[in-house]
């Protein structure tokens, strides 16, 4: 077993990244990995920090207290190498997404229609047929997301914005706002290995780094506005194990909200 401990402190992207890094024989020979989930505030044992030989982390500011990046650096052995890895997030496919609590995958327009107390057929008709670009500045919303990513990218030597800008219209790069697909996860894994001076595997299994059961459907009006070649009204998505078009997904959203069910992810798995 490899003797050097590598600690990975990341969100849900950490697990698939580790799976991809472990495809490198040189990485496996040098490092054994312990992963800790940052957004759940999973504690990192002092004994692990004390013997850490490589710290891979997504940057957390001082608001995270003892789990902030600076606080964790102070508890690592002197001279322990660290690498800030990307924390990928993209609203370009879902500019109306909201992170407001109480419901998964919130959509500000759909929530507004629901809060108006309209009947289900009227809600779905307005949501699917309205010209979203006339109601919302979709370009500005997407640009704000991209600007946020540029600021985050500055913290890591693994650059990814050029790849997103080059390919996001012709290839689905994200499964949800914070679940990157195989190309981006492979890009990050290769960047980490390059930074460490380790060889990648000859045949990289990119499937090891994806989230196959999480495909958030893309509104056809958004797809049309941005010229997305892979999304339309008839596109079928794998939504938590269920095949759905966007219209079917929207109906499930409305049904779940009207039934006062908060766990939309669990609901999707049953519908």
Image (tube, rainbow, N blue to C red):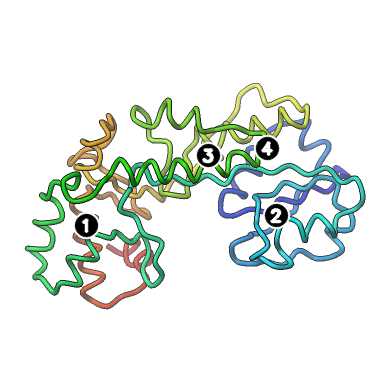
Judged from this view, the residue extending furthest toward the bottom is 260
> Closer to the N terminus: mark 4 or mark 3?
4
- Residue 154 in the figure: left or right of residue 207: right
Residue at 59% over, 62% down: 39
Q: Report crowding for label 2: few under 14, some 14 to 19, many 20 or more residues within 10 A (C-alpha).
A: some
Instruction: Residue under label 4, please give it.
Output: 21
Name the residue nearer the viewer: 50 or 263.
Answer: 50
Q: Quadrant of the C terminus?
A: bottom left
- Residue 241 in the figure: left or right of residue 58: left
Closer mark to the observer between disc 1 and disc 4? 1
Distance between mark 2 and mark 4 Cα atoms = 13 Å
- Residue 110 in the figure: left or right of residue 210: left
> Closer to the N terminus: mark 2 or mark 4?
4
Q: Secondary structure at mark 2?
A: strand
Distance between mark 2 and mark 1 Cα atoms = 35 Å
Do the residues bearing badges 2 and 4 touch, measured as CB atoms within 8 Å? no
Q: Secondary structure at mark 3?
A: helix
Do the residues bearing badges 1 and 3 touch, measured as CB atoms within 8 Å? no
Distance between mark 1 and mark 4 Cα atoms = 37 Å
Name the residue nearer the viewer: 218 or 140.
Answer: 140
Q: Quadrant of the N terminus?
A: top right
Do the residues bearing badges 2 and 1 touch, measured as CB atoms within 8 Å? no
Q: Secondary structure at mark 1?
A: helix
Distance between mark 1 and mark 3 Cα atoms = 31 Å
Instruction: Residue under label 1, please give it.
Output: 250
Measured from the top left, where is residue 247 in percent x and y? 18, 51
Judged from this view, the residue extending furthest toward the right is 78
> Closer to the N terminus: mark 1 or mark 4?
4
Residue at 60% over, 42% down: 86
Judged from this view, the residue extending furthest toward the top is 202
Instruction: Residue under label 3, please give it.
Output: 150
Disc number at residue 35?
2
């Amino acid at each position: 077993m490899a003797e050097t401990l590598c600690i990975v402190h990341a969100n849900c992207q950490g697990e698939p990244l580790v799976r991809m890094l472990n495809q490198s024989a040189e990485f496996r020979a040098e490092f054994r990995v312990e992963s800790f989930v940052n957004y759940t505030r999973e504690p990192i044992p002092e004994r692990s920090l004390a013997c850490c030989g490589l710290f891979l982390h997504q940057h957390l500011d001082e608001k995270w207290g003892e789990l902030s990046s600076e606080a964790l650096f102070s508890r690592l052995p002197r001279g322990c190498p660290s690498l800030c890895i990307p924390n990928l997030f993209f609203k370009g496919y879902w500019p109306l997404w909201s992170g407001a609590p109480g419901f998964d995958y919130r959509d500000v327009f759909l929530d507004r229609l629901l809060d108006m107390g309209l009947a289900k057929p009227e809600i779905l008709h307005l949501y699917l047929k309205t010209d979203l670009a006339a109601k919302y500045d979709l370009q500005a919303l997407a640009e704000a997301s991209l600007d946020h990513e540029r600021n985050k990218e500055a913290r890591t030597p693994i650059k990814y914005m050029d790849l997103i800008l080059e390919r996001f219209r012709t290839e689905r790069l994200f499964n949800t706002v914070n679940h990157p697909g195989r190309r981006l996860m492979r890009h990050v894994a290769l960047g980490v290995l390059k930074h460490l001076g380790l060889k990648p595997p000859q045949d990289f299994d990119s499937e090891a780094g994806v989230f196959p059961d999480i495909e958030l459907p893309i509104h056809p009006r958004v797809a049309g506005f941005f010229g997305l070649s892979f999304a339309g009204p008839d596109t079928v998505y794998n939504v938590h194990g269920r095949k759905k078009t966007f219209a079917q997904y929207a109906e499930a959203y409305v049904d779940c909200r009207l039934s006062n069910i908060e766990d939309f992810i669990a609901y999707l798995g049953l519908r």
